[in-house]
Each structure stands twice: as C-alpha cells, then as structure tokens.
Image (spheres, helix red, strand yellow):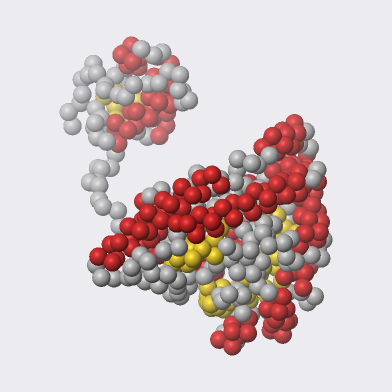
Amino acid sequence: MPRAPLDAPLVLPPLVRDGAEPLAVQLAAALRDAILAGRLPTASRLPATRRLAEQLGIGRNTVLAAYEQLQAEGFILARGGSGTEIAPLPAAQPPQAPAARPLSRRVRHLMEIPLPFGRHPGALLAPGMPDLDHFPWAEWSRLLARRWRRPGPELLAPADPAGHGGLRDAIAQWLGRTRGLRCTAAQVMIVSGSQQALDLTAKVLLDPGDGVLCEDPCYPGLRGVLRAAGARVESVPVDALGFDIAVAEHAQPAARLAWVTPSHQYPSGTTMPPARRLALVDWARRREGWIVEDDYDGDFRHAGPPLAALHGLDGDHRTIHLGTFSKSMFPGLRLGWLVLPDDLVAPFLVARRLADMAPPSLTQAAMADFMAEGLFARHLRRMRGLYAARRTAVMAAAERHLTPFGTLAPGEAGLHSVLWLHPGHDDQDAAARAHAAGLACPPLSNYRIHPGPPGLVLGWGNLPEDRMDTVLRRLADALGQQATEECRSGVGFPLSMGG
C-alpha cells in the first residue's frame, strides 16, 4: 500500500486548549477517528512528533503522549528508525440500516403504555404538577445547607434500605395524626416516589399469571408495573362511588390482590365511601388477599379534613399503604413511602437491596427536619387554601367556556379534575388539538383498560387563578375547532348540544 510522505500535513479538528480534556487526549481521539474513518490508511506514516507539534503549535511531549496512547491501543506501530505508521486493521464494513434489536417481553409490554403528557413545571393543565412558586424554598435550602455542613458519618455511609430513621418516624407520626394509621417507624419504608413503591410491591407479592383487581380507569404507570411482573390485569369499572369489590369479586373470583385509590380515585376523582372500604377489607380477610392503597394526594382534600386511610380500618393487617411527597412538596424530590404489615417488612427489604438501596440520605434527613420543625404542616395549610381557591376558579371558568363540550367534575380532593366530554367526542383527537394549542391535558382513554366515555384530565394545581379564564378559553377554542370540523363532516353533534 502506498505510504503518505513524511511531511504530508494532517487535517485534524482544532484542539481546545482550555477544554475539559487534556490536549494529548484530544489529539489521540482525533487521530483515532481519522484511522477508523479510513482517512489514514494502513501502513501510511504519521508525521514525526516534532514536526506534528510544530504544525499544531503544541508541545512535543503532548504529541508523544498521544502516540503512546494509540500505540498501546494497537492503532499505530513504531518502526524504530522508519518512523510511526498506521497498524493493519480489519476492513471497515459499509454502514447498514440497524435491524430491530431484541428486547425482553417485559420492555415490549412497557412500550405499549402511553407516555405522560407535559411533565415539566410550565406545562399548562398537566395533571400531577403542584404549584412551585409558593413552596418555601428558603426554609428548604436552609435545612439542606445545614445537613451538608454537618452531615455526620451515618449520612455518608451506605444507606439503610428501609430509609432514614428520622424520616420514617416523622411519617409514621404524621400518618397517625392525619390519616388514622396505626403504624410504627419500623413498618415504614422510604422509596424513590410512588412508582418505585408500585414496582417493589409487584415484585414481592406477584407471580406471573396472578390476577390483580384494578380500577378502570387507572394510572397508566400501574398497568406498566403489572405487565412487567407478568400479572393479569382484571379491570373493575369505577362508578360514582369508586371501586366496588362486590362487582369485582363476582366477575373475578380468583384474584387475591386489589390495587385501589380510595381517597381520590385516579383519575376520575371519586371517593370510596366507608361501606365499600369496609367491604374491601372484609374481602381481603376472607380471601387471604392483599390491598394496595395508593394515597397519592390524600393531603389535599377540599371537602373537609383528609379522610382516614383504608389502612386504618384493616385490623387483619392486609393493607399496604403507599404515599408520596411529589404533590405536597415537589415532584423532583423523589421521596415516597410504603407502610407495610410487620410480616412483609423483611421480604420488602430483600427486594429493596436489589433495587437502588435507598434515596440519598441527606435529602431524607432534610425532609425529616422539614417535618419535625413544623414546616411541612405549615406548608400544607397554606397550599390547601391556595388549591381550594384554584378549584373554585377552574369550575367557574369551565362553566363559562367548556359547557358546550362537556362537564367538569369538581372532585373532592387533589389537583386535577376530569372534563367529561359529551358523547361523540374523540378524546384522543381533543387532547391532540389541545396539545397543539400549548395545553398538556391527556385523554381519559389513556388511563382506561377498556373503552369508556371520553374525557380530558385537567391539572390546575400550577395554574394561577388570574390565568384560569384565559387558559380554559384557549382549551374551548381548540375543542370548538374539533366540533366544527365534525359537524361539517356529518359526524358528532352540534355545538349547542347539552349534557
């Protein structure tokens, strides 16, 4: 093969003298790329180190270090008095279109789940986003800084998979005072948000093929967890009173686990009354089954104080209670909890050790301080008033602008409401048009296991009252465009059609 003359100049990308990588590393990478791309063919000679250093305006030792690195990797050969040349390499294969890569059945199932809409603080009408402007950032920063200044060896050592003891104790006391749970710190496990709580619970309690009673509609992330575990999702349609175990037991008598959101059904917003709660507890006792109570936003109840948790009614200890600080604090905190029956603590700890051990100890400690100093309770009192005013504002704006298209159900808790669209609307199309208008309200069909009435899930937690009217008018304009086109095509219903 013909060799390039010794004095042939090399064309290389410019080296960044003040970059994060040393010049020798940059030079070695540039030469390596040129060799792999075929711009420096096999057996062609590289310039002498002194000459290349002069050409690039760098020190000779830098070039020597780059050459030594490439020689160690086998890309170049030093021929003594004959100079340095490119080592033989396998012929490069022409690029081919990538074939479909094999994936596990678990991931293939997960990829069928619709992605969430608008998961960023500025997304208008996105469910699950609390108001971040009114969070007490100064107090939170002070607690974090204090912990960072004096972390202590216990916070720098490997984390306890059950979680920080102070935070577990604070959560147990908080749930006892506000939700009627009879639990100790030993039963509390700190997790990285409710999604990890769902995943751990499925891994501990479910085998492939097990049937799980699920509300329909429900949180899409739950369906993903259950599919990943190989479980059979047995849907139970939600009515005006939420989940009905009598209906579920008749239709699916073999199931032994029920996954419910009794305090504020997600996403429909209904609340399970005491009679149905007690019937569900009795079912778990008779069937020797399990109840998973997802209390994702139970701190924000607008029709009176927070309800007693289902866990507090279960004297047979068959309820697993899970909660999260994502709504009450902020989503990026990634802290939640599980309250476990005593005999499940050890199995959950085993599963947890094989996951991520625990969230960062310093963050947990700061959250424990936030609760112990009364800042959490004060923050919730302030936010409950703010969200109650926003709920009133969104209902009034919906009555002004959205009545031609559907009915907004107020819901008794939480930071979102469902706009139940009139029959004939396609909620997927409605959500797409809203998205094109800059609104992130997902279609209710994304939450359904089986088809049902159409709707949009409107999150208003991060929407100030003075913007509520403008934003809902924008949504009405998007829906009006949809309805107008349907009427022109002879499909759907006239704009004046009522509920």
- State the image coordinates of residue 202 (x, y, percent, origin top left): 60, 68
Total numbered labels placed on residues in the image: 0
Residue at image position (64%, 41%) is 134
From this view, report whether residue 295 is shown above or below residue 246: above
From this view, report whether residue 251 is shown above or below residue 411: below
- State the image coordinates of residue 5 (x, y, percent, origin top left): 20, 20
Residue 444 or 12: which is nearer the viewer?
Answer: 444
Residue 151 appears left or right of 82:
right
From this view, report whether residue 13 is shown above or below residue 217: above
Residue at image position (68%, 39%) is 136
Q: Is residue 157 visible?
A: no
Residue 411 or 352: which is nearer the viewer?
Answer: 411
Residue at image position (52%, 70%) is 217
- State the image coordinates of residue 305 (x, y, percent, origin top left): 74, 60
From this view, report whether residue 20 is shown above or below residue 60: below
Residue 155 appears left or right of 438:
right
Residue 48 or 159: which is nearer the viewer?
Answer: 159
- State the image coordinates of residue 327 (x, y, percent, origin top left): 63, 52
Q: Quadrant where the N terminus lies? A: top left
